[in-house]
Amino acid sequence: MAETAVFDSTVAGVMAELAGLEDPRAREVNEKHGDDHGVNLGKLRAVAKRLKTQQDLSKELWDTGDTAARLLSLLICKPKAFGRDELDRMLREARTPKVQDWLVNYVVKKSPHCEDLRQEWFADADPVVASAGWALTSERVVKKPEGLALEQLLDTIEAEMKEAPDRLQWAMNHTLAQIGIEHPGLRARALGIGERLEVLKDYPTPPNCTSPFAPSWINEMVRRKAGT
């Protein structure tokens, strides 16, 4: 009879397990994207599936400051259990792109504090924090545009995106593309801004993938929606 594996679900035990999953090749790939960990994300998700939801453990893993542990913590947390100030602190502590991306998409978007934080982060002087605000704004452009000043968003993008730091530029470009895709009345202007600024025009894009260059992205998604 096969033995059932026994796992230590304490912080120390989980950290030891993550250390055992460290892969130098995965770290090399991740570091090219600014993420300082070497754990395959599929294996990380398998650990999260086994642990299930554990809010206390999630907080303890986050507090280690370790990137792989923080990614795992975001997979086993209860998004609605975090307070507003707690989420704000976590966002400002999220040093790497993947941690920020998962925090925004897996946790903040499900929080009752999402809109309040979107507005605060959007106007933040720190471009990394502001990029989170723009990411949440892109979501609203698609799902709940009522109340958003879309023309003013385009004004800001036109004036600031070209010189914005990388993560903020990427998030602003995403908003530009979503406005062009979802709002036909503003599509021509969005395309024009993208063509003039040429942000991400030469971004290396694998075959069969859509370029992040806003005009290409907009035109391709509109074509798909039309079924042509």
Image (cartoon, rainbow, N blue to C red):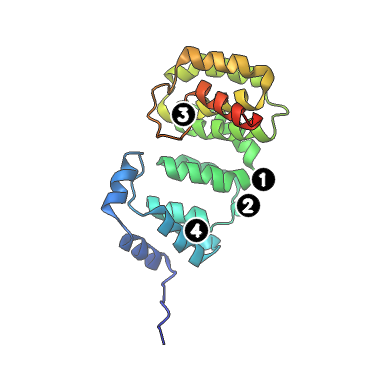
Q: Which residue is most to the right?
A: 146
Density class for disc 3 (Cα within 10 Å; few <14, some 14-19, many ≥20) is some
> Which element carries disc 4, helix, strand or loop?
helix
78 and 169: which one is in front?
A: 169
* Residue 112 disc label: 1
The Cα atoms of the two marked residues, 1 and 2, are separated by: 7 Å
Q: Nearer the viewer, mark 4 or mark 3?
A: 3
Would you say the residues marked 1 and 2 are in contact, meaning their CB atoms lie under 8 Å apart?
Answer: yes
Q: Earlier in the sequence, mark 3 or mark 2?
A: 2
Which one is earlier in the sequence, the residue at label 4 or at label 3? 4
Residue under numbered circle 4: 58
Q: Residues within 10 Å of mark 4 (few under 14, many from 20)?
A: many
**Which residue appears at 54% of the width and 57% of the height?**
77
Residue 26 in the image: state x and y as whole percent.
Answer: 32, 50
Residue at image point 48% right, 61% down: 48
- What mark, if any, has residue 85 been given in the picture? none
Q: What's the amino acid at mark 2?
A: Lys
SS at badge 3: loop
Type of amino acid under label 3: Ser
- Position of residue 42 relative to residue 10, above or below, is above
Report, in whole angstroms, how far the alpha carbon at label 3 lies from the one at label 2. 34 Å
